[in-house]
């Protein structure tokens, strides 16, 4: 269902979300003159815009992905700029390094576009590898809904990380590498930060894929502590691989690269692993339920904390979420966006083609 009313601060346009009063777009999927970017994932940060506005902390990753020469203004979290008379500021989303919600204020109205965000039913359970999600009061909240179904309830991250470390330890004991698959920007760093206990217990080394290494560098440059990592080709003593944790994007599944590891166990870390059968469809030995997106209780809490009386739902289970919000007495609708689907592949992030043709698309996407 589309929602549009005269005076809306943000509307849906063919090229993306658009603020008519300020004449700028938010995470547009087609080239525009002025784009405010919530975060550097490929489906939100596209090439070809005239000017970019994003958090200063995401600048390194954005330039690496979109080109060093882009025209980019970086803002601190909470810092405001006026764009054609509209006050724009960026606030932590807890999703990946530099991720932000966009707060737009004009003529007494405040709208917030969330981009992707992480918060969960366990309110103290924040993403420690970036600035944690902060609710922002607003009249209208445009929320993502990637995992907007009641079945999605994340366990505390520490429990999942402990399971991963146990799996690693058991593999090392059995003399085989542990290949842990997760998207190279965000998930990989969260996994690395989360397995520090394994390193402290004497497990190691940690090997990373070439797609992961430059992003680790960006996180470290931003002051995020990650355990020491080494590239596969730099491991000269191949016997070490039998004890290694290897962090790589899902695209390596079944590739020549992963065959270099020798005997190994593989696992996929994603919110989609909560779906029965998802692990089997991905063709991996283990699935760890770990997401960079809010779960159902997290979405509900985040929406309530904004105080918004109107909510617009994007990418995900829009209809279910909209119905639920209306039952809570809120004005709710959805925007159809081009986020999430099929664009991870731009970064070589998509897993190998699924073995079973029945595999639904979402399992292959970010999460
Ligand atoms: Zn994202
Ligand atoms: Zn997204």
Image (tube, grey):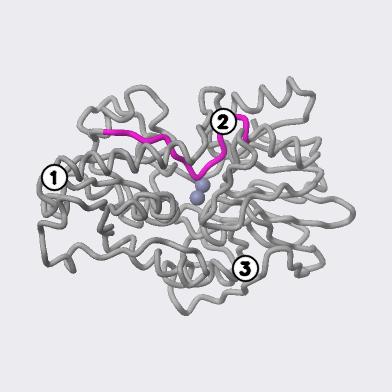
Q: Is residue 96 left or right of residue 134?
A: left
Instruction: Give the camera-side residue of 21 and 291.
Output: 291
Instruction: Give the camera-side residue of 242 and 339.
Output: 242
Q: Earlier in the sequence, mark 3 or mark 2?
A: 3
Q: Which disc is residue 175 wearing?
A: 1
Q: Which disc is residue 53 wearing?
A: 3
- Specify start and end residues of the magenta stretch as a single range: 286-298
Residue 335 placement: quadrant: top right
* Mark 2 surroundings within 10 Å by alpha-carbon count, few (fewer than 14), some (14 through 19), many (20 or more): many
The CA span between labels 1 and 3 is 48 Å
Place of residue 343 in the rendered image (x, y in percent of width and height, measured from the top left): 40, 50
Q: Nearer the viewer, mark 3 or mark 2?
A: 2
Q: Against 39, is 294 above or below? A: above
Pointers 1 and 3 in contact (CB under 8 A)? no
The CA span between labels 2 and 1 is 40 Å
Pointers 2 and 1 in contact (CB under 8 A)? no
Instruction: Give the residue pinned by disc 2.
Output: 148
Secondary structure found at label 1? loop
């Amino acid at each position: 269902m589309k929602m549009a009313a005269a005076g809306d601060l943000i509307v849906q346009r063919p090229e993306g979300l658009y603020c008519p009063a300020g004449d700028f777009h938010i995470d547009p999927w087609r080239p525009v003159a002025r784009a405010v970017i919530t975060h550097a994932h490929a489906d939100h940060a596209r090439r070809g815009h005239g000017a970019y506005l994003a958090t200063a902390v995401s600048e390194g990753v954005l330039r690496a992905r979109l080109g060093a020469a882009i025209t980019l203004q970086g803002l601190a979290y909470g810092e405001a700029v006026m764009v054609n008379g509209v006050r724009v500021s960026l606030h932590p989303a807890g999703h990946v390094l530099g991720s932000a919600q966009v707060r737009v204020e004009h003529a007494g109205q405040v709208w917030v576009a969330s981009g992707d965000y992480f918060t969960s039913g366990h309110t103290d359970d924040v993403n420690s590898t970036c600035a944690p999600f902060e609710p922002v009061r607003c009249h209208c909240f445009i929320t993502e809904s990637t995992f907007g179904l009641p079945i999605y309830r994340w366990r505390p991250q520490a429990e999942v990380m402990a399971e991963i470390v146990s799996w690693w330890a058991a593999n090392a004991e059995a003399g085989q590498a542990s290949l842990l698959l997760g998207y190279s920007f965000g998930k990989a760093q969260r996994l690395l930060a989360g397995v520090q206990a394994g390193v402290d217990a004497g497990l190691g080394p940690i090997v990373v894929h070439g797609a992961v290494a430059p992003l680790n560098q960006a996180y470290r440059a931003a002051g995020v502590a990650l355990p020491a990592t080494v590239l596969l080709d730099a491991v000269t003593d191949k016997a070490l691989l039998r004890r290694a944790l290897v962090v790589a994007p899902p695209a390596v599944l079944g590739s020549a690269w992963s065959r270099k590891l020798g005997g190994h166990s593989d696992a996929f870390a994603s919110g989609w692993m909560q779906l029965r059968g998802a692990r089997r469809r991905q063709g991996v030995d283990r699935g760890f339920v770990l997401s960079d997106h809010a779960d159902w209780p997290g979405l509900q809490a985040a929406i309530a904390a904004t105080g918004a009386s109107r909510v617009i739902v994007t990418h995900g289970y829009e209809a279910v979420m909209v119905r639920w919000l209306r039952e809570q007495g809120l004005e709710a609708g959805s925007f159809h966006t081009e986020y999430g689907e099929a664009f991870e592949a731009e970064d070589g992030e998509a897993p190998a083609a699924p073995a079973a043709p029945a595999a639904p698309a979402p399992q292959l996407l970010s999460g």
